[in-house]
């Protein structure tokens, strides 16, 4: 990490206080805090970073930062006015690609944390803010906080020294003749929040390292500052410091850790970054080789290459910029034996122990740069260019679109927190309250804050996120964070609650919102998938609230077998909307026939891949029959009435492709979602439930697949599986009734897929390698499946359960596969899983059946 020079200055901007309910760690040694919503750091674009670097090296980074720049809380300043560049010993200036290479290695060109993409805001990038022992071989202490070990390297150039709070400076370093002096708080803040100021300070440090090493005689080749390779000693010292000559014969110079001869680096390594996978294994190269490699090939960023790279006359010349292993290994100069590849450093301390102080301090050359074969700078932005435009990632939702005008929005930060992004202004009131509760460890501090983050975006350009943890694992409880939203105390009665989900920082399928209606009423809950990949309001339902009501969300989620616990979980705004008791509260359950499989587009949360995880529940946005059902006397669907304004109905579609009975009522997860009846939407207020279920238990999809492949598919196993479903189906219907005792339950069966009465359809079916006997048998199995459902439902009706069965076979007659107006798709290779599922017309037919039942 770089070492700064010292400065004096004026007053400081205050940081927020912290506790078990606050977001800021008051015990931190680093000066500018994490998770302070009043300290949101803008993430520059790579183009902005390159522009600032180009201006800095020529002394032109002097534009005015106005008072309150990006809500920094600072008075106006100029980056190189505060931190002017230094003159170089021997003349010249810093080649900009050397500097950009350093920034690439130090921070990936980030001023804010790596969670933040260019254009957005978040926590400052701080090197080991918590002083955790991350790089030893003991994983048990990875989450132990040691404030005195905090690195406190801030921003793009990782400014470290001077960045601790006053009274918490590092101990002096006698070997470097250096004692840390804390910078004035306002300068610390400028360095932490402004990428340009950070770059101005980092350049000054690099210039100082050039002067230190050159004045001490560490000169490469002809010492001309224009050539990249001649900066090797300054780069080396930027990372690990420079040990000055004490004039007592003790070792001095640049340290052993970055010596190319150090055997911790593979002897056969190639030029760094010539392979795009190299940055994933940075430990295989010494620091100066990584910097030159980034200068030569540029770092990759989400917005493309980070900057225009330096150039060499030829590829061979570029590869020769990597020093030889023996370039800085000489028995007579630094006690280094190039013949001992395993342990070349032979220096010993006064007691005769090897001490790895083979420090280099003499002139050298592994390239002769005067001939022009060394690396050339490419200055992209001359002084005529203004500061480049801001990035546009994570565009926030800055309107009340999606909720009615009478909604009470409880945001995740109070109205006193400024919005950083231009073009986003607060048009909503400051209602109710939002608080965060961090699980306490003994003793404090709160480890749960370590993996807790703020991010620009979402509603109002700010939200919080952390990662899910296993609520059943006691070792994970210390990471628990709970957010609590409370509506205004005067808000009681029937209330629709909607939660805002941001487009990023929200991955979990297990966000379990606990609704406490207040007044000693029993709590309710809703499990929500957050990976909508867009800013959106998600309806939690309508509840009768009393005084003291609240909604809470924890990152300690229920156990999900076989899945990781590192999903992002977001805490954003909550909307409380006064309304009346819904005239109907409708929940759609079941399998792919109810989800609308094959009828794209799907709800984003039911159709995604995220690494090795994802969902194929495939809930159709428009063509799932539940979305088409109208309550008798209404001209609009139940779903649209729930979405419009305050809403007059309640609606939730939980059906999931591939679901079996166990995925509706058991302990099994389907596509990462818990059993449908456990997601909280079924309760005493539920009026209507519809579903299709059982086909996957009977293995219909596998049977049809075997038939389509021309394999033997007609055997007793299918019929036996159907017969065995009597108990599971009855259990499923019973458990639905127990969860929603006041609901009318409508079970829909499955249609015949094939028309075996007419010659033309039979000829068409045969093209799918399904013969007439197969088609007849498949239709017969459908009838048996429907009969088993009917029998179970008949028994439950006799017990007083409000449940009925609808046989769709008559409605689909004449509309089978290969009929002139089919309601079911045949083999469809263009849409995953669409084959043998109802098309939009088929879903409308299902909706009509439900509609007829309701109307009657």
Image: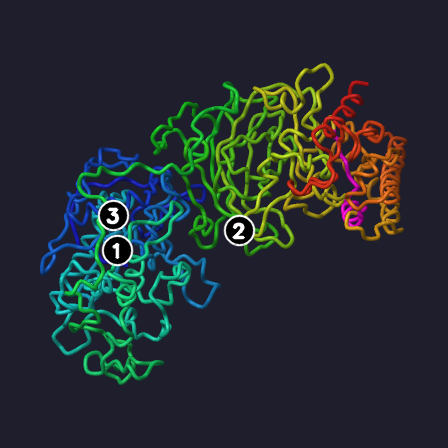
**Sequence-earlier tag: 2 or 1:** 1
Quadrant, the N terminus:
bottom left
Where, by quadrant of the figure, is residue 168 drawn? bottom left
Marks 1 and 2: in contact by CB < 8 Å? no
Marks 3 and 2: in contact by CB < 8 Å? no
**Distance from label 2 to label 3 (Cα)?**
32 Å
Left or right placement of residue 15 versus residue 659 in this view: left
Q: Is residue 726 visible?
A: no
Q: Looking at this view, is 160 or 836 the one in front?
A: 836
Q: Which residues are magenta?
A: 689-707
Give residue 299's position: percent from left, percent from top.
35, 54
**Distance from label 2 to label 1 (Cα)?**
39 Å
**Sequence-earlier tag: 2 or 3:** 3
Give residue 581's position: percent from left, percent from top.
65, 20
Q: Is residue 411 visible?
A: yes
**Magenta stretch contains residue 92:** no
Relative to residue 355, is residue 651 depicted above or below? Answer: above
Q: Residue at x 79, y 41 (%)?
A: 694
Q: Give the crowd class for mark 2: few <14, some 14-19, many >=20 residues within 10 Å.
A: few
Residue under pointer 2:
566
Q: Residue at x 16, y 73 (%)?
A: 362
**Sequence-earlier tag: 1 or 3:** 3
Q: Closer to the camera: disc 2 or disc 1? A: 1
Give residue 64's position: percent from left, percent from top.
19, 36
Residue under pointer 3:
198
Relative to residue 274, is residue 61 depicted above or below? Answer: above
Q: Give the crowd class for mark 1: few <14, some 14-19, many >=20 residues within 10 Å.
A: many
Badge count? 3
Which structural element holds mark 3?
helix
Q: Which mark is residue 310?
A: 1
Left or right placement of residue 685 versus residue 138 in this view: right
Seen from this angle, which residue lies furthest left? 90
């Amino acid at each position: 990490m770089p070492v700064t020079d010292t400065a004096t200055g004026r007053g400081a901007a205050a940081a927020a206080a912290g506790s078990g309910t606050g977001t800021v760690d008051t015990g931190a040694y680093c000066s500018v805090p994490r998770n302070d919503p009043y300290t949101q750091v803008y993430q520059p674009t790579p183009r902005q970073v390159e522009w600032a670097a180009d201006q800095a090296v020529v002394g032109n980074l002097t534009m005015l930062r106005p008072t309150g720049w990006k809500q920094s809380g600072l008075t106006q300043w100029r980056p190189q006015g505060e931190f002017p560049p230094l003159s170089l010993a021997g003349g010249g200036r810093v080649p900009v690609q050397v500097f950009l290479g350093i920034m690439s290695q130090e921070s990936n060109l980030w001023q804010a944390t790596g969670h933040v993409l260019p254009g957005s805001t978040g926590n400052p990038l701080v090197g080991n803010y918590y002083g955790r022992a991350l790089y030893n071989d003991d994983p048990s202490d990875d989450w132990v906080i040691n404030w005195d070990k905090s690195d406190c390297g801030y921003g793009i150039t990782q400014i470290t020294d001077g960045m601790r709070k006053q009274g918490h400076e590092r101990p002096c370093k006698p070997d470097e003749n250096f004692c840390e002096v804390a910078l004035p708080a306002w300068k610390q803040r400028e360095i932490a929040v402004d990428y340009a100021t950070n770059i101005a300070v980092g350049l000054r440090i690099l210039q100082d390292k050039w002067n230190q090493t050159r004045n001490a005689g560490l000169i490469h080749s002809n010492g001309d500052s224009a050539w990249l390779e001649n900066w090797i000693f300054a780069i080396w010292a930027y990372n690990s410091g420079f040990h000055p000559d004490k004039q007592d014969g003790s070792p001095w110079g640049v340290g052993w850790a970055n010596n190319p001869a150090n055997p911790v680096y593979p002897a056969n390594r190639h030029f760094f970054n010539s392979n795009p996978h190299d940055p994933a294994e940075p430990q295989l190269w010494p620091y100066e080789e990584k910097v030159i490699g980034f200068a030569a090939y540029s770092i990759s960023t989400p917005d493309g290459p980070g900057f225009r790279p330096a150039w060499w006359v030829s590829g061979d010349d570029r590869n020769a910029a990597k020093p030889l292993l023996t370039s800085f290994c000489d028995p007579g100069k630094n006690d280094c034996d190039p013949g001992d590849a395993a342990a070349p450093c032979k220096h010993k301390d006064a007691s005769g122990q090897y001490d790895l102080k083979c420090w280099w301090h003499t002139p050298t050359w592994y390239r002769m740069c005067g001939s022009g074969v060394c690396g050339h700078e490419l200055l992209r932005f001359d002084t005529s260019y203004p500061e480049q435009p801001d990035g546009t990632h994570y565009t926030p939702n800055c309107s009340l679109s999606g909720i009615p005008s009478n909604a009470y929005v409880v945001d995740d930060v109070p109205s006193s927190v400024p919005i950083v992004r231009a073009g986003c202004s607060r048009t909503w009131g400051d209602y109710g309250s939002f608080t965060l509760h961090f699980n306490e460890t003994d003793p404090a501090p709160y480890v749960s804050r370590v993996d807790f983050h703020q991010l620009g975006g979402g509603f109002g350009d700010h939200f919080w996120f952390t990662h899910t943890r296993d609520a059943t694992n006691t070792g994970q409880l210390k990471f628990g964070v709970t957010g609590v939203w409370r509506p205004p105390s005067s808000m009681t009665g029937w209330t629709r609650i909607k939660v805002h989900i941001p487009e990023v920082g929200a991955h979990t399928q297990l966000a379990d919102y606990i609704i406490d209606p207040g007044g000693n009423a029993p709590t309710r809950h809703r499990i929500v998938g957050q990976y909508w990949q867009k800013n959106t309001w998600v309806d939690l339902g309508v509840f009768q609230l009393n005084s003291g009501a609240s909604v809470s969300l924890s990152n300690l989620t229920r156990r999900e077998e076989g899945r990781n616990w590192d999903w992002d979980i977001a805490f954003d705004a909550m909307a409380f909307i006064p309304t009346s008791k819904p005239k109907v509260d409708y929940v759609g359950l079941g399998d792919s026939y109810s989800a609308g499989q094959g009828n794209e587009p799907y709800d984003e949360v039911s159709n995604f891949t995220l690494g090795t995880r994802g969902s194929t529940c495939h809930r159709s946005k428009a063509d799932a029959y539940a979305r088409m059902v109208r309550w008798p006397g209404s001209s609009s669907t139940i779903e649209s009435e729930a979405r419009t304004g305050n809403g007059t109905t309640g609606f939730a579609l939980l059906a999931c492709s591939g679901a079996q009975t166990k995925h509706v009522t058991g302990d099994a997860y389907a596509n990462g979602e818990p059993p449908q009846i456990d997601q909280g939407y079924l309760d005493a207020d539920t009026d209507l439930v519809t579903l299709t279920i059982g086909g996957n238990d009977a293995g219909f999809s596998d049977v049809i697949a075997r038939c389509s492949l021309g394999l033997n598919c007609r055997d007793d196993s299918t019929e036996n599986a159907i017969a065995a479903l009597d108990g599971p189906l009855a259990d499923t219907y019973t458990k639905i009734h127990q969860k929603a005792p006041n609901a009318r339950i409508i079970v829909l069966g499955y249609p015949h897929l094939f028309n075996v009465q007419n010659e033309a359809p039979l000829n068409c079916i045969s093209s799918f390698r399904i013969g007439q006997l197969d088609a007849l048998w498949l239709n017969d199995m459908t009838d048996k499946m429907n009969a088993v459902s009917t029998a179970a439902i008949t028994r439950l009706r006799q017990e007083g359960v409000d449940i009925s069965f609808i046989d769709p076979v008559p409605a689909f007659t004449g509309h089978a596969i290969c009929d002139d107006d089919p309601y079911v798709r045949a083999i469809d290779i263009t849409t995953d899983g669409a084959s043998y599922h109802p098309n939009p017309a088929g879903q409308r037919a299902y909706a009509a059946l439900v509609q007829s039942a309701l109307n009657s």
